[in-house]
Image (spheres, grey):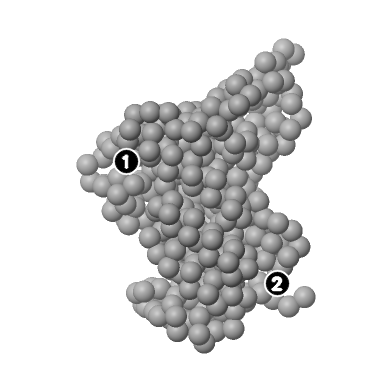
Amino acid sequence: MRSLRFALFGTGFWSRYQLAAWRELQGVECVALYNRTRSKAQALAAEFGINAVYDDAEALLAREDLDFVDIATSPDLHCRFVLLAAARKLAVVCQKPMAPSLAECERMVAACQAEGVPFFIHENWRWQASIRCLKQVLNERPIGELVRARISLTTGFDVFANQPALREMDRFILLDLGSHLLDASRFLFGEPHSLYCRIRRIRRDIRGEDVATAFLEHACGMSVTCEMSYAGSHVENDSFPETLIFVEGAKGTIAVTKGFQIRITVNNGTRVISAKPEWYGWADPAYLAVQASIVPCHRNLLAGLRGCAVPETTGEDNLRTMRLVFAAYGSAENGGLARV
């Protein structure tokens, strides 16, 4: 089976981990890099032995023989590049968040549908080892009917040091982190029918909100609270980048705790499962939980690109997550409950 050839658009902080994760898989090869600042693309190309470098996206698409593009630019450029690729009948893998507006998200999905090209979102949070393990445990129903859950990432970790562009986002934490947590909630517990959200900006050196709390209601009566914060500078037992989850059921509880443990408590005691991620030498230890999840996410997307399976995070599926994100902003702005 021949290797699929792709170009990576964007050579910022996450790009080297994106490329390293692709190299863990057989049958896929990055042949070109694009970045509007050419020197950044050249530096990454030298690191990974990639010969073709561009600062003109249209020239890259015209000259290179590609099977798909992987778009890892800032979100405000996602729509432009997805439309360019779709017009050339190229499959698209696009990083989350899909786009900074719901209208753009819908346009991207519609354009790829109209051109008949696969469109997948690289939403890797649901591929974290602890979240996959929790999903398997939930499917076994050891705690009976689910009552409520809490999904939380509250940290003092300075994400702006490695990604300074995040400081300039008018809408920040719900787009950047909320898209992850809300997608994880959908993966674990299904689709909500309404949500209520509150946001705040605590840090004064950024433009967008850095604290958000979303309360999701399900038709079965279950509720899920998604808590996220980058505001604190000192957080006891900071678990970044691990997501902590607590699920309450009619017959017990399940907790995803710091250190990648799944703790299942029922009337006869607590059972503990280790769900540590796989270690990769190229991963940054500070981001291991996230970066290790890129590999299984890539594997799932590659199967979709080859037509062997339908990936979990198609554009159509991720559009449901983005509708939750923008409904959360709407709720926060008007103070009311949003139907979704």
Measured from the top left, where is residue 9 in percent x and y? 47, 70
Considering the image in quadrants, where does the N terminus appear? Answer: bottom right
Q: How many residues crowd around disc 1 within 10 Å: few (fewer than 14), some, or many (20 or more)?
A: many
| Number of disc labels | 2
The type of residue carrying mark 1 is Glu
Percent across and percent down for residue 315 are 57, 56
Q: In the image, residue 203 lies at what x, y percent?
A: 26, 40
As drawn, 43 above or below 273: below
Question: Which residue in the rendered view is the most extreme toward the left?
Answer: 204
Tell me the residue that label 1 is attached to. 209
Q: Residue at x 50, y 58 (%)?
A: 95
Pick whichever of labels 1 and 2 is earlier in the sequence. Answer: 2
Helix, strand or loop at disc 1?
loop
- Residue at x 26%, y 47% (from the top left corner): 207
Q: Do the numbered discs 1 and 2 sit on residues whose CB atoms are within 8 Å? A: no
Which secondary structure lies at badge 2? Answer: loop
Q: Nearer the viewer, mark 1 or mark 2?
A: 1
Q: Quadrant of residue 327?
A: top left
Q: Residue furthest front?
A: 114
User: What amino acid is at disc 2?
Assistant: Gly
Q: Position of residue 317 (x, y in %)?
A: 60, 50
Q: Which mark is residue 323?
A: none
Question: Does 145 appear above or below 13?
Answer: above
Q: Which residue is mark 2?
A: 27
